[in-house]
Image: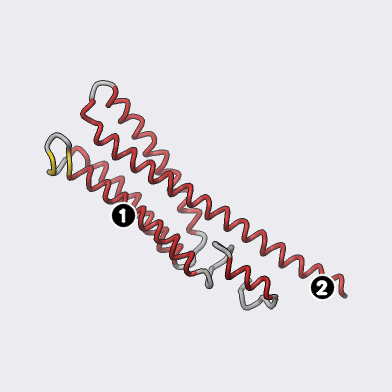
Amino acid sequence: MDQQQHNDSAERVLYRTSSIGPYYLQNTQGELSRVQNVFLGYALLIFLLGGLAVMYTPQAGFQFNPKAQSGLISAAACGGSAILWGVLFGRGQVWALKGALYSTLLFVVAFGWRATVAWREVFGEHPEKWWAASLISAMGIASAALLVAALRWQAARADTAAMINKASFGDKKKARKAD
């Protein structure tokens, strides 16, 4: 169902004003680039937090921390996938939103679990691990915010698809009644 196949002006306006349509989007480049920028901003934040985990310790200052390599690996996986989803979505591949939803949900669960374990250690036997617990928590909060944003985009996309289907089927019913 292309935009070119629609003759009704209401449907053309609906395609142009929809935040996220159900098909390959051509006329909402501003919205697509905004979504892409959110994913790229998330990736940069996660890379920054992963770099801080490896390059800084409160006890020794700025120096390489070999114990924090898992933070760098987590940042590379999360940031890399966010860049991938952002670029795909920015190119109009709306299906990439589902992949972004599932991978971001996985990151929220993983960071939530890691943060819980880290904060238990902080309040238990190892209060010096507060820095790692804080960084992991920040990664989890950023991932949760991205998940909420992606769920909103998915809901907007579903609403737009329902409006387009209603408009399309409504015109066909009117045409049948006129015959």
Residue 140 higher or lower than 6, as above or below: above
Q: Quadrant of the C terminus?
A: bottom right
Q: Cβ–Cβ below 8 Å for labels 2 and 1? A: no
- The amino acid type, in three-letter code, at marker 2 is Ala
- The label shown at residue 175 is 2
Question: Could you tell me which residue is drawn at 53 percent across and 69 percent down?
Answer: 25
Callout 1 environment at 10 Å: few (<14), some (14 to 19), or many (20+)?
some
Which of the 4 image quarters holds residue 159?
A: bottom right
* Between 74 and 43, the one nearer to me in the picture: 43
- The image position of residue 177, as x and y in percent, is 87, 70
* Between 44 and 109, the one nearer to me in the picture: 44
- The label shown at residue 44 is 1
- The image position of residue 59, as x and y in percent, is 14, 34
Residue 138 falls left or right of residue 98: left
Q: Quadrant of the N terminus?
A: bottom right
Which of the 4 image quarters holds residue 157?
A: bottom right
- The label shown at residue 68 is none
- The image position of residue 60, as x and y in percent, is 11, 37
Q: CA distance from mark 2 to mark 1?
A: 52 Å
Residue 79 falls left or right of residue 179: left
Mark 2 lies on a secondary structure that is: helix
Residue 155 falls left or right of residue 59: right
- The amino acid type, in three-letter code, at marker 1 is Leu
Q: Seen from this angle, which residue lies furthest top?
A: 125
Residue 75 higher or lower than 30, as above or below: above
Question: Could you tell me which residue is drawn at 36 percent across and 53 percent down?
Answer: 42
Question: Could you tell me which residue is drawn at 87 percent across and 74 percent down?
Answer: 178
